[in-house]
Amino acid sequence: MENILKHFPQKAKEVEVENKKFFAKLKKKPPKHLDSLMQELHEEEFKRTDCLTCANCCKTTGPLFTDKDVERISKHFRMKPQQFIETYLRIDEDKDYVLQSVPCTFLGADNYCSIYNVRPKACREFPHTDRKKFQQISNLTMKNVEICPAAFNIVEEMKRLLNK
Ligand code: SF4
Ligand code: SF4
């Protein structure tokens, strides 16, 4: 995985234009079976992917923390929500709570998440490739393929199957 991650940004750059065209077309006319196709591609890819050898999402980008996330995680630490916010979070340009720094503070040296059972919703759902109406999150997906090898492979497979 180390080797894949090293060459990954370049690989993602090479398909950027192609992906833009693909997603523009997908948005205009999504196939009827898109939800089930995404479910299938997501499951197949994550059977092959060992996130513990990667953790690139936790190392390079952080999740948004919803109010519910803050409530749940601060309770886990027996902290007051405000104290948790002041210790770990900041407000970004979209007025969302995000981590003060990356790699994520809760990521261990062994790539395990130390708050796995109470982790933010955004972490549980990343890279969102099994989401319904997948065509609606094209812009986010184009960013995610630059950091997530699994999302990259899923989009490549989508292109192979739908561009026939
Ligand atoms: S979700 Fe993607 S970026 Fe995150 S650890 Fe798994 S393969 Fe890596
Ligand atoms: S909270 Fe856990 S899963 Fe989410 S970015 Fe941090 S280490 Fe990764």
Image (cartoon, rainbow, N blue to C red):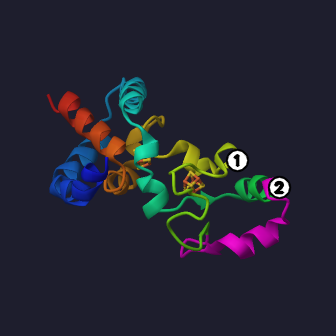
| Location of mark 2 (residue) | 75
Mark toward the start of the polypeptide (2 vs 1) = 2
Q: Residue at x 43, y 63 (%)?
A: 60
The answer to whether residue 11 is above or below residue 27 is below
Decide if residue 24 is on the left or right side of residue 35: left
Q: Nearer the viewer, residue 47 or 72?
A: 47
Decide if residue 149 is on the left or right side of residue 117: left
Decide if residue 59 is on the left or right side of residue 112: left
**In magenta segment, residue 49:** no
Q: Nearer the viewer, residue 59 or 128?
A: 59
Find the magenta span and give its range.
Answer: 75-95
Q: Position of residue 25 (x, y in %)?
A: 24, 43
Q: Callout 1: helix, strand or loop? A: helix
Q: Position of residue 30 (x, y in %)?
A: 32, 34
Figure disc tally: 2
The C terminus is located in which quarter? top left
| Location of mark 1 (residue) | 118
Gap in angstroms between the C-alphas marked 2 and 1: 10 Å
The answer to whether residue 104 is above or below residue 31 is below
- The kind of residue on which mark 1 rests is Val
Give the numbered dot on residue 21. none
Q: Residue 46 occupies which quadrant of the picture?
A: top left
Q: Residue at x 21, y 36 (%)?
A: 159
Cβ of mark 2 under 8 A from ligand 2 = no
Q: Callout 2: helix, strand or loop? A: helix
Residue furthest toward the front? 110
Q: Check whether the beta carbons of the residues at disc 2 and disc 1 lie within 8 A of each other.
A: yes
**In magenta segment, residue 83:** yes
